[in-house]
Image (tube, grey):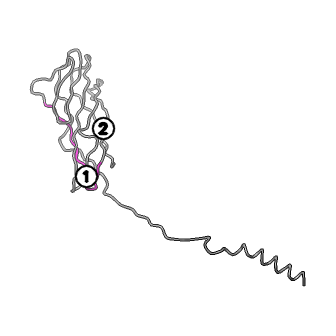
Amino acid sequence: MKVLLRSAVVLLLSSGSAFAATGNTSTIAGSATATVVAPITLTHTPGAALKFGTVTRGTGGTVVVTAAGAASVTGDVGLAPGTINGADAFTVTGDAARSFSVATSAGSLVSGANSMAFTTTASAGSVTLSAGGTGTFTVGGTLTVPATAVAGAYTGTYTATVTYN
């Protein structure tokens, strides 16, 4: 009988840990959400370009075109009479009323083996799209004209990048 009682106690004690007591676990559902927004799209305005104009070089200097399109010079550089200067222009479409940042790179104007470096400046570092999901910005820049610049027609490119904030 003692053996039977001892076996029953051992069985009871060892099986007690296999059953979880109430209050040791709890389960509830969590929640998840997602919002899909319209993709941001950058378009170059047809016919627009960062136009530094026609310049004379002298001993060198810079041509500055503001994001509003106004031109000025520094150093011994001049704007030729009748020159046309202008800022470049872009349109952005995307999610209505969402803001985005603007970044532009530097570039180089090239004529054959000759080149001149320029930097760019966007009209704003951050823009908010309208309720219709559109926005615009312009780009000005500073062209460095060295004293050794060779006469010729120079062309080049730079990049503009927009990113949702």
Q: Which residues are magenta?
A: 84-99
Q: Nearer the viewer, residue 165 or 13?
A: 13
Instruction: Find residue 63 and report its horizontal and vertical position in percent.
Output: 21, 25
Crowding at mark 1 (Cα within 10 Å: few <14, some 14-19, many 20+) = some
Query: Is 85 in the magenta?
Result: yes
User: Of marks 1 and 2, which one's residue comes earlier in the chain?
Assistant: 1
Q: Residue drawn 28% across and 53% down?
A: 98
Q: Nearer the viewer, residue 110 or 123?
A: 123
Looking at this rendering, what residue extends furthest in the bottom direction? 1
Instruction: Find residue 151 and report its horizontal and vertical position in percent.
Output: 21, 21
Looking at this rendering, what residue extends furthest in the top direction? 59
Tell me how far mark 1 sits from mark 2, CA to CA.
18 Å
Under mark 1, the amino acid is Thr
Secondary structure under the numbered disc 2 in the rendered image: strand
Q: Residue drawn 30% across and 47% down?
A: 100
Crowding at mark 2 (Cα within 10 Å: few <14, some 14-19, many 20+) = some
Under mark 2, the amino acid is Thr
Q: Residue drawn 32% across and 35% down?
A: 105
Instruction: Find residue 158 and report its horizontal and vertical position in percent.
Output: 29, 36
Splitting the image into 4 quarters, where does residue 118 fall?
top left
Image vertical order of residue 20 relative to residue 145, above or below: below
Splitting the image into 4 quarters, where does residue 153 fall?
top left
Mark 1, residue position:
93
Image vertical order of residue 16 relative to residue 146, above or below: below
Mark 2, residue position:
104
Splitting the image into 4 quarters, where does residue 87 fall?
top left
